[in-house]
Amino acid sequence: DLHRQGIRVAMITGDSQAVADAVAQRLSIDEVAAQVLPADKAAAVARFQEGGQRVAMVGDGVNDAPALAQADVGIAIGAGTDVAVESADIVLVRNDPRDVVGAIVLSRGAYSKMRQNLVWAAGYNVVAIPVAAGVLMPWGIDLPMAVGAVLMSLSTIVVAANAQLLRRLRLRPDRGGSR
């Protein structure tokens, strides 16, 4: 659920206000802009951005392409038109807008793993490079080159294993699976 992730959800649609309100109520959408002309969707995205908000736009049609391009992150539904897909930063393979939640979970997880791996690699190298260069030699501590090579390989394995933990993310919690 987007709300649990601290994301405010708005809908910009060309549909009537009554239809938009019904959909918004059913899906717990925070803000609705109905009867918006295709040309005005990008302007609506820009208004959100003027308020200092980062905006992700989800769309599937030619009418959504300018708004997808205007958004900080444009997300096209896989079965969308070619122009929508070309305008987007992310393309969802399935024609299921619920996959947006999974894409956000995956991107946040990948960013977190990237930061963890960067901290690990930097910390490891801050310690390992001076030791390998012999800074501890005055105290009789020597790191043979073969041991240094093995430790470097182990560090790479730690980074790769940590990245594999992304597989544990629940991208589709509504289906109970991990993918």
Image (cartoon, rainbow, N blue to C red):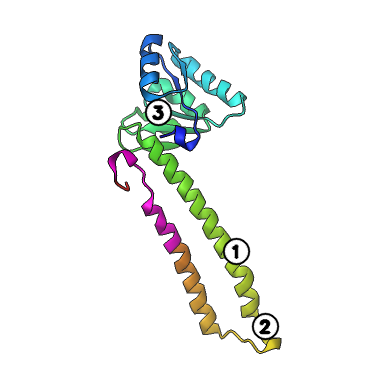
Identify the disc placed on residue 122: 1
Residue 152 covered by magenta stretch:
no
In three-dimensional space, the C-alpha distance between marks 2 and 1, rounded to whole angstroms, equals 20 Å
Q: Residue at x 46, y 26 (%)?
A: 9
- The residue carrying pointer 3 sits among few (fewer than 14), some (14 to 19) or many (20 or more) residues within 10 Å by Cα, namely many
Where residue 14 sits: x, y (%)? 40, 14
The magenta span reads: 161-176
> Type of residue at label 3?
Ala
Mark 1 surroundings: few (<14), some (14-19) or many (≥20) residues within 10 A? few
> Hey, what amino acid is under mark 1?
Ala
The CA span between labels 2 and 3 is 59 Å
Residue 19 location, quadrant: top left
Dot 2 amino acid type: Leu
Q: Secondary structure at mark 3?
A: helix
Side of 168 where 119 appears, left or right? right
Where disc 2 sits, the SS reads loop
Badge nearest the viewer, 2 or 3: 2
Horizontal and vertical percent position of residue 56: 48, 31
Residue depicted at 45% across the width and 13% down the height: 36
- For label 2, count other residues whose C-alpha is less than 10 Å away and answer few (under 14), some (14-19) or many (20+): few
Image coords of residue 59 (percent x, y):
40, 26
Find residue 50 and report its image quarter. Answer: top right
- Reply yes or no: does residue 170 show up in magenta: yes
Residue beneath label 2, please? 136
